[in-house]
């Protein structure tokens, strides 16, 4: 059966066409993926430049910014001006750690539940639940906090010797709920990647399920769980609106878990719209933004360094 | 091709009827399609294949046999430069297709692969209709005319002995809805559509049941008239059944594969020159 | 008299069994608790919006005297979402193709991966500041939908790039090799085999991302604006006119930002109802995006790999 339709073909040894030499597909896609490089540089440039304005153009000394006194508008009252940002840094760290404290047991527990205990039908409920959980917008959490959580706290937990409303605790509690799905999903991945052979070995020795989990699975997954908690803390540190709505916005150093507090993100959110560009008050907000940027970049580099050193056998 | 009695998987190698042996020898004596000279393949620092010199004759079926891991597939894939896709793989030596070196500087892998087709171990049809699967190659090579494509597709499916089974709905049915054996014949049809000179087959039947295997072997014998076929197989009886010439490879002490012996299939299986070959085909190792 | 050959005393054995049961109970409790919390939140907002939720709320204009509606801000949420996707999906697709198909382990691909991680870590409020500096001040645009979309693109682009990359890497090697063995170029293989197989995964991811974008507020406060729009004239198709709701330069307070604004600046007596119902809308949208993505993913998966 001879085919009348044939495919044209030249010699096997030939010069590349211009298109093949240039390979436009490769170049265009390379440029698209390299945009992120540009974005990182732009971020550093714009926020960096604005962040140092308070020192360069307003001439405020470093000492006035790196201290614990936040008195930005008081130059007209007491003559003393201080743009100390330590309360905000401390506040950020404070809510971050307490939120991690609250969320970690629940998240890791949930991850263990999903990976080791839950039957298939339960997993088909918890898995989508996590996805929806993660998708709930920050404002919704904040609004929930302000309309439900804070009144609950102040009505029900008052009278034990303190009043509790807009506070460090409220902020951490809301944040804990927000970072719960983040920690859970990463911890879940870490736990499920523990090889089945390890579990099998433990079970074959006649141990209960909890013993296997506690003595074999969790230690093996510890690195991943730690990463999960760190990433959760990072998310907590960067959260703005939900925190701002429930934390009370008092720019003081954190001393008591029941006190109103504030964080870097909350203060930026609060003051940015109310300050005039070019004034030191406005400029210090940019400085706070720069601090946040450097902290988050530093975190990423630190996590990378840690995971690389862990991989060395 | 008729063979006396149906072969089973455990029966000893069947001697090839004299008439076809002569035909095969005559055919392969007339033209050398592929030649490897001083072929060495490295994966990183490790040499996987050492100093291969062999010739593949036109319009014949050549089988590569040998224990697993001895580099048969690696050598096979040199013939269509598929090893280029493996990071860290390095091919040294000459590989000539119709006398032209396919690894020369100006030769594009794309051109080589249009002329040398490859059938994989596991059937891998695209998630498209049967028609689109077969038309894929010609379309990518620039054929747009619908009538031309129709003709190429039908001819290819016929030549792959698949026509009777799909002729009613090959335009609509997905390639993935076929059975394993049918899928593999679809992959063969897909390869045929690009009008290759050579068809390489890398253990094409190892994922198929015995009935599908026999169908493919029959198909190979038919295809031999128009194409040159090189097949890698770990099944000695299959090599003895279908091939005209056989090359036996094994692993040397340096863990690199090398060519032990190559010759007419009947000779290799009944009267090999090398002791190693004798040991392998009689089942003493491998 | 047979000796017991157990290596544990029965007391310790009973303790471990008891511990196992307690642990199982605790874990179940945690699982149930978390799901209940989620359910409670959803139900809370749905209930709280009863009485306020109506078509006139969803599509009507805000009002100073009554509860009013969220029509304009809802429009803005959709507008900014679509604009962001228009910017980031094509670029993310191309970028992901490069990372999955062309990039090796060289310096530039590694730098790109590092940059993706760095940007993903930046808090969205800082992205908002960046947007303020670049897309509001430097360009002298003031608050615009385009500025908001560009700010959102800053952290959505690396996300979609990584999404595409992962979806492409999941395409089985055999399919790709099969195409290359037929003598096609790399780009042909990507375009006709790898990409079509990766599309279901990409699409699912894009829908999930869209859900996040819809609820985003921190990055939009300083770029798309906070002021409550009073009324949108949809008949105005002049794209250069910042008053036209079709123009990329109109100030675009979104639903999420609106809730925050109500909380911080809202003065009317209906703040509670407005915010509750708006939150209910957001929660329902998240549910739709999430479950929709899952369902779509399953349908597409079956069609791509299954029998025709």
Image (cartoon, coloured by chain):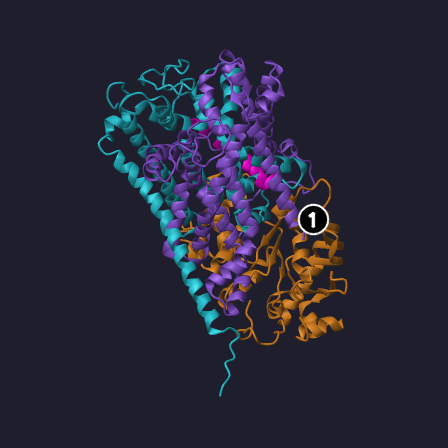
Chain colours: A purple, B orange, C cyan
* Residue occupying the far top of the picture: A76
Residue count near mark 1 (Cα–Cα under 10 Å), binned few <14, some 14–19, many ≥20? few
Pick whichever, A169 or C59, lies toward us: A169
Image spot of residue C208 (x, y percent): 42, 39
Image spot of residue A224 (x, y percent): 55, 49
Image spot of residue A256 (x, y percent): 47, 35
Which secondary structure type mostly characterizes the magenta part of the structure?
Answer: helix
- The answer, for residue B151, to whether it is visible in the render is no
Query: Is C91 one of the magenta-colored residues?
Result: yes
Query: Is B205 one of the magenta-colored residues?
Result: no
Q: Count the marks: how many?
A: 1
* Residue occupying the far front of the picture: A161
Pick whichever, A104 or B51, lies toward us: A104
Q: Measuring 42% from the left and 41% from the top, which residue is drawn there? A: A177
Q: Chain of mark 1?
A: B
Could you tell me which secondary element the residue under label 1 belongs to? loop
Pick whichever, A65 or C83, lies toward us: A65
- The answer, for residue C70, to whether it is visible in the render is yes
A184 left or right, relative to C179: left
Asked which quadrant contains residue C293, the reply is top left
A267 left or right, relative to C179: left
Residue range in magenta is: C83-102
Picture layout, residue A58 above or below residue B37: above
Picture layout, residue C117 above or below residue A311: above
Image spot of residue B232 (x, y percent): 63, 61
Asked which quadrant contains residue A156, the reply is top left
| Residue identified by numbered label 1 | B88
A68 left or right, relative to C148: right
């Amino acid at each position: 059966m001879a085919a009348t339709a044939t495919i044209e073909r030249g010699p096997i040894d030939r010069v590349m066409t211009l298109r093949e030499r240039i390979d436009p597909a490769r170049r265009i896609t390379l440029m698209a993926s390299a945009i992120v490089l540009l974005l990182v540089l732009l971020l550093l440039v714009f926020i960096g430049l604005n962040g140092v304005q308070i020192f360069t153009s307003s001439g405020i000394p470093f000492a006035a910014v790196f201290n614990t006194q936040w008195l930005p508008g008081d130059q007209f009252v007491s003559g003393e001006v201080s743009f100390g940002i330590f309360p905000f840094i401390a506040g950020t760290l404070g809510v971050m750690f307490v939120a991690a404290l609250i969320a970690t047991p629940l998240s890791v527990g949930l991850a263990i539940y999903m990976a080791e205990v839950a039957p298939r039908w339960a997993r088909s409920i918890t898995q989508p639940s996590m996805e929806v959980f993660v998708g709930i917008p920050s404002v919704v959490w904040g609004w929930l906090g302000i309309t439900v959580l804070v009144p609950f706290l102040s009505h029900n937990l008052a009278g034990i010797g303190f009043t509790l409303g807009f506070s460090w605790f409220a902020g951490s509690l809301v944040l804990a709920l927000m970072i719960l799905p983040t920690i859970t999903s990463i911890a879940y991945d870490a736990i499920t990647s523990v090889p089945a052979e390890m579990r099998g070995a433990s079970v074959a020795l006649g141990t209960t399920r909890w013993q296997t989990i506690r003595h074999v699975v969790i230690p093996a997954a510890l690195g991943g769980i730690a990463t999960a908690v760190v990433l959760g803390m990072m998310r907590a540190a960067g959260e703005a609106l939900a925190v701002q709505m429930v934390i009370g916005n008092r720019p003081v150093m954190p001393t008591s878990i029941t006190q109103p507090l504030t964080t870097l993100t909350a203060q930026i959110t609060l003051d940015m719209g109310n300050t005039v560009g070019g004034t030191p008050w406005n400029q210090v907000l940019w400085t706070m933004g720069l601090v946040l940027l450097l902290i988050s970049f530093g975190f990423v580099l630190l996590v990378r360094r840690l995971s690389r050193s862990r991989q060395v056998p | 091709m008729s063979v006396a009695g149906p072969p089973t998987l455990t029966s000893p190698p069947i001697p090839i009827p004299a008439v076809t042996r002569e035909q095969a020898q005559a055919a392969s004596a007339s033209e050398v399609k592929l030649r490897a000279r001083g072929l060495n393949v490295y994966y990183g620092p490790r040499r996987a294949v050492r100093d291969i010199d062999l010739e593949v004759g036109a319009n014949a079926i050549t089988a590569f046999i040998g224990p697993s891991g001895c580099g048969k597939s690696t050598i096979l894939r040199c013939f269509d430069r598929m090893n280029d896709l493996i990071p860290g793989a390095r091919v040294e030596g000459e590989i000539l297709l119709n006398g032209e070196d396919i690894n020369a500087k100006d030769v594009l892998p794309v051109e080589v692969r249009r002329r040398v087709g490859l059938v994989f171990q596991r059937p891998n049809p695209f998630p498209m209709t049967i028609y689109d699967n077969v038309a894929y190659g010609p379309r990518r090579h620039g054929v747009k005319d619908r009538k031309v494509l129709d003709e190429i597709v039908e001819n290819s499916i016929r030549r792959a002995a698949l026509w009777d089974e799909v002729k009613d709905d090959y335009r609509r049915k997905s390639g993935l809805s076929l059975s394993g054996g049918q899928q593999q014949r679809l992959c063969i049809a897909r390869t045929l559509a690009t009008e290759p000179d050579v068809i390489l087959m890398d253990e094409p039947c190892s994922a198929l049941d015995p009935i599908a295997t026999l169908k493919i072997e029959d198909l190979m014998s038919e295809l031999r008239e128009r194409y040159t076929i090189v097949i890698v197989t770990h099944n000695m009886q299959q090599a003895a059944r279908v091939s005209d010439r056989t090359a036996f490879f094994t692993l040397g002490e340096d863990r690199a594969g090398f060519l032990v012996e190559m010759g007419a299939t009947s000779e290799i299986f009944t009267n090999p020159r090398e002791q190693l070959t004798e040991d392998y085909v009689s089942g003493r190792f491998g | 008299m047979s000796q017991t050959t157990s290596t544990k005393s029965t007391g310790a054995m009973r303790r471990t069994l008891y511990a196992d049961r307690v642990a199982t109970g605790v874990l179940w409790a945690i699982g149930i608790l978390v799901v209940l919390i989620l359910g409670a939140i959803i139900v809370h907002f749905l209930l709280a919006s009863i009485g306020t939720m109506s078509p006139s709320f969803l599509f009507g204009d805000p009002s100073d005297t009554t509860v009013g509606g969220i029509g304009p801000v809802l429009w803005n949420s959709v507008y900014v979402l679509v604009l962001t996707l228009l910017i980031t999906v094509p670029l993310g697709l191309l970028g992901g193709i490069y990372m999955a198909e062309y990039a090796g382990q060289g310096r530039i691909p590694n730098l790109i991966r590092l940059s993706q991680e760095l940007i993903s870590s930046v808090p969205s409020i800082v992205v908002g500041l960046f947007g303020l500096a670049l897309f509001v001040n430097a360009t002298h645009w003031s608050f615009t939908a385009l500025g908001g979309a560009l700010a959102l693109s800053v952290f959505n682009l690396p996300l979609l790039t990584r999404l595409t990359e992962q979806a492409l890497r999941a395409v089985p090697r055999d399919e790709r090799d099969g195409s290359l063995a037929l003598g096609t170029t790399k780009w042909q293989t990507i375009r006709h085999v790898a990409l079509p197989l990766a599309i279901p995964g990409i699409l699912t991811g894009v829908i999930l991302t869209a859900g996040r974008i819809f609820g985003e507020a921190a990055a939009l406060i300083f770029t798309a604006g906070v002021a409550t729009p009073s009324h949108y004239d949809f008949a105005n198709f002049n794209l250069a006119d910042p008053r036209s709701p079709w123009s990329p330069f109109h100030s675009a307070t979104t639903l999420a930002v609106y809730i925050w604004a109500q909380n911080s600046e809202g003065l009317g007596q209906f703040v509670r109802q407005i915010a509750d119902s708006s939150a209910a809308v957001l929660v329902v949208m998240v549910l739709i995006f999430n479950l929709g993505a899952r369902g779509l993913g399953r349908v597409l998966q079956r069609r791509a790999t299954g029998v025709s």
